[in-house]
Amino acid sequence: MRHVALIYDARQLYDVKVMAGVAAYVRKLANWSVYIEENSLGDQRLPDLRTWHGDGIIADFDDPRVAAQVTASRIPSVGFGGGFGWYDPASRIPYFHPNNRAISRLAAEHLLDRGFHNFAFCGYPASIVNGWSQERGQEFAERVGESGFACSTYAGKHRTTRNWEGFRASLGRWLASLPKPVGLMAADDKRARQVLEVCRLAGIQVPDEVAVIGVDNDEMLCQLSHPSLSSIESGARRVGHEAAALLDQLMSGKRPRRHKFVADPEGVVTRQSTDVLAVDDSEVARAVAMIRANGTAGATVQNVCDALKLSRSTLELRFKRAMGRTLFAEIRRVQLQRAECLVRESDLTLKQIAAQSGFGSVQHMTTLFAARFGSPPATYRRQASSRFASRG
């Protein structure tokens, strides 16, 4: 039996999900006796790591005291956190953190797909541990910029909402100043819920005027928000499972080839806060709805035009003006999006995936897939099975 300490912040959903991933690993594959305290990270009463006869540690390194004590213990350890804070790469302790670039690009694509031309990011004031907020904001602005759009950013001066009235007034002024309709990414679900609450108090309609997406997919928070909050599942459970597997290797004397692991997000969970199409042209909106419903079932540009009783040239012109892409490009986008999901999440053969995604052949799908996602489907599937990439 291995004696393992789990050191995490019980107030933070990301940490709790990481621990859920650890628990899943232990239930199936490990015989561990676990030392655990469900406190905030700063209040953790760590065992005396100089005398505790433990075999391993999994710890959140976003607290300086925790990071220092775990690093000094010389006990086999795996760290995780937001990618900033007190992790010391020189320690050679394996460390997991979210892929903020991929998270922000998922959010941007989600809002771009809904036809928005105005964008905003709501984050936190800078600190040593929340550089992930700035990183997400920068990546979000960069992605919408690639599509020719600007992004307004808000961090404010309030690190907490203890001064709710001051925070509400500041955030409310910023939200009121944004051109509408606007697609807004919040740094996490907590910030997104605050945006929704301020919108409600200010009479700003969600999602018609402001569509909001958060990060972490806190299901209770998302469902209690009004309207329910769309969010990105950041992959925390996977982090916990992989961290536990790696610690098992370390406790058996095996050394990892690398020490920095970046966890890719698992996808967008769409709820009411982004359930909108920001298009004034009703016929274009109908065309988009038809393509998204039937694009993988053989829909063609001519089918859509015939169904709407509009000439191809007329609908093409109106669609390109409203959406920034052609009808055919939208059909291909929907087909490739479906193919990517099936490659990543299913065990279907490539022939089955091609058929279910609306492609006539595996070869055709493979060519377009590689151009869109950077590698052919088989390679993409192998890479996605881990969802971790090395940095440094």
Image: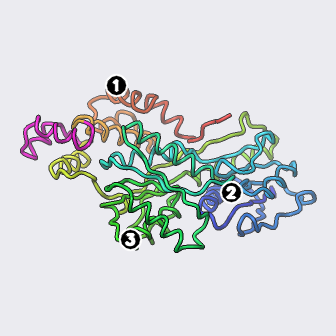
Name which of mark 3 and mark 2 comes first in the sequence: 2
Residue 1 visible, this orientation: no
Out of 328 and 167, give the one closest to the viewer: 167
328 relative position to 266: left or right: left
Given the current orientation, which residue lies at the most extreme right position? 51
Quarter of the picture holding the N terminus: bottom right
Nearer mark to the viewer, of 1 and 3 = 3
Q: Is residue 240 above or below residue 189?
A: above
Between label 3 and label 2, give the one nearer the viewer.
Answer: 3
Mark 1 or mark 3: name the one nearer the start of the chain.
3
In the rendered image, residue 125, in percent from the top left (x then y), is placed at 60, 57
Q: Secondary structure at mark 1?
A: helix
Query: Which of the two discs, 1 and 2, sits closer to the camera?
Result: 1
Q: Can you tell which mark lies on residue 26?
A: 2
Q: Are marks 1 and 2 in contact (CB under 8 Å)?
A: no
| Percent position of residue 371, x then y | 39, 27
Residue 302: % across, % down: 12, 36
Amino acid beneath label 2: Val
Q: Is residue 313 above or below residue 275?
A: above
Amino acid at pointer 1 = Gln
Which residue carries the number 3 mark?
202
